[in-house]
Image (cartoon, rainbow, N blue to C red):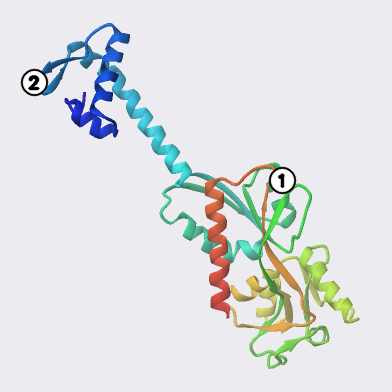
């Protein structure tokens, strides 16, 4: 109908001219009427063919639309992704990863939230989030964890702090200068407490908070020294803070959580790669 000759139709379809002619004859036998009148080398559609084509053409448009949507889904160009993260990664790495992920994907939408670790785990486990991002979760029933990178926690203080000239800060150093600790009910707080107990120093914060970002804000206000994760330490704009190595070593992994019984979609795979790229970029900038 579109090309008027079997030669042009064969080229468009990528088949032989004889195959086109055979297909037309088979269709005419099934329909019970002629589709084309042959005029020299061209084939003029009959009135019945034109009428049938008008009915069928919208179906072809719908089919092309479906094929296009399938291609976009396969290539991760359309769809919706649900992401949840804890504050350290949610306020540092994820914004960078999201910007890179959404660039060139106008058909993709994202539902994003920053919550406590328990909320992130529960959301992934029940399927309310496709991907969860958190720190220090090696394993947990109901979710699969993938370690993307491991870093050490550091001591954070104002650049004019009395011990800022030390290259390594230990428990005794922070206790004497207004130690801002992390809630022992949190995973990072428990790791920090264990580090103190390893060197037989009592874990006695002057102020105890749940989130590393809160500890950093207090340190910036001159209240003392905070021991926080590397993401909080390296991603705090407009704060006059400096970071020193903390000893004993506290290693914390950046982890991606998914449901073990659900394979990642092409969108989720693309976003996970953006997260890895953002982590690598942050590591290079920090070093």
Label 1 neighbour load within 10 Å: few <14, some 14-19, many 20+: many
Q: Residue at x 26, y 14 (%)?
A: 25
Q: Is residue 144 left or right of residue 27?
A: right
Instruction: Judge whether residue 237 can be spotted in this image.
Output: no
Q: Residue at x 73, y 88 (%)?
A: 168
**Comes first in the chain, label 1 or label 2:** 2
Query: Judging from the image, what secondary structure is the residue with disc 1 in?
Result: helix
> From the viewer's perspective, is residue 263 above or below residue 27?
below
Could you say where residue 245 lies in the image, as x and y percent from the top left?
71, 83
Could you say where residue 102 lies in the image, as x and y percent from the top left?
46, 54
Give the quarter of the image for residue 107: top left
Could you say where residue 56 lies in the image, as x and y percent from the top left?
31, 20
> From the viewer's perspective, is residue 131 above or below residue 12?
below
For disc 1, the marked residue is 125
Q: Which of the image's four quarters has the C terminus? A: bottom right
Contact check, label 1 and label 2, Cβ < 8 Å: no
Query: Which residue is the extreme one toward the left?
Result: 40
Give the quarter of the image for residue 286: bottom right
Q: Nearer the viewer, residue 245 or 39?
A: 39
> From the viewer's perspective, is residue 37 above or below residue 94?
above
For disc 2, the marked residue is 40
Q: Which of the image's four quarters has the N terminus? A: top left
Label 2 neighbour load within 10 Å: few <14, some 14-19, many 20+: few
> From the viewer's perspective, is residue 211 above or below residue 18?
below
Q: Nearer the viewer, residue 13 or 143?
A: 13
Q: Nearer the viewer, residue 268 or 206?
A: 268
Instruction: Judge whether residue 52 can be spotted in this image.
Output: yes
How far separated are the C-alphas under marks 1 and 2?
A: 68 Å
Could you say where residue 6 lies in the image, as x and y percent from the top left?
20, 26
Give the quarter of the image for residue 243: bottom right
Query: Judging from the image, what secondary structure is the residue with disc 2 in?
Result: loop
């Amino acid at each position: 109908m579109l090309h008027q000759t079997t030669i042009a139709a064969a080229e468009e379809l990528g088949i032989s001219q004889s195959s086109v002619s055979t297909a037309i004859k088979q269709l005419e036998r099934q329909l019970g009427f002629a589709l084309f009148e042959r005029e020299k080398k061209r084939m003029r559609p009959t009135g019945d063919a034109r009428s049938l084509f008008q009915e069928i053409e919208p179906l072809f448009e719908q089919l092309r639309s479906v094929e296009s949507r399938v291609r976009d889904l396969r290539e991760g160009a359309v769809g919706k992704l649900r992401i949840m993260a804890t504050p350290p990664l949610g306020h540092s790495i994820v914004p960078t990863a999201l910007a890179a992920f959404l660039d060139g994907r106008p058909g993709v939408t994202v539902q994003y939230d920053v919550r406590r670790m328990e909320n992130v785990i529960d959301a992934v486990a029940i399927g309310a989030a496709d991907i969860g991002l958190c720190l220090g979760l090696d394993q947990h029933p109901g979710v699969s964890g993938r370690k993307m990178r491991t870093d050490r926690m550091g001591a954070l203080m104002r650049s004019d702090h009395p011990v800022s000239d030390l290259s390594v800060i230990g428990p005794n150093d922070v206790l004497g200068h207004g130690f801002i600790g992390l809630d022992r009910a949190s995973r990072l707080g428990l790791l920090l407490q264990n580090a103190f107990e390893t060197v037989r120093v009592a874990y006695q914060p002057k102020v105890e908070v749940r989130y590393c970002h809160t500890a950093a804000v207090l340190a910036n206000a001159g209240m003392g020294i905070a021991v926080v994760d590397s993401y909080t330490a390296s991603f705090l704009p407009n704060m006059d803070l400096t970071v020193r190595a903390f000893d004993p070593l506290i290693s914390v992994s950046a982890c991606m959580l998914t449901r073990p019984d659900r394979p990642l979609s092409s969108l989720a795979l693309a976003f996970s790669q953006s997260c890895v790229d953002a982590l690598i970029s942050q590591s290079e900038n920090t070093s």
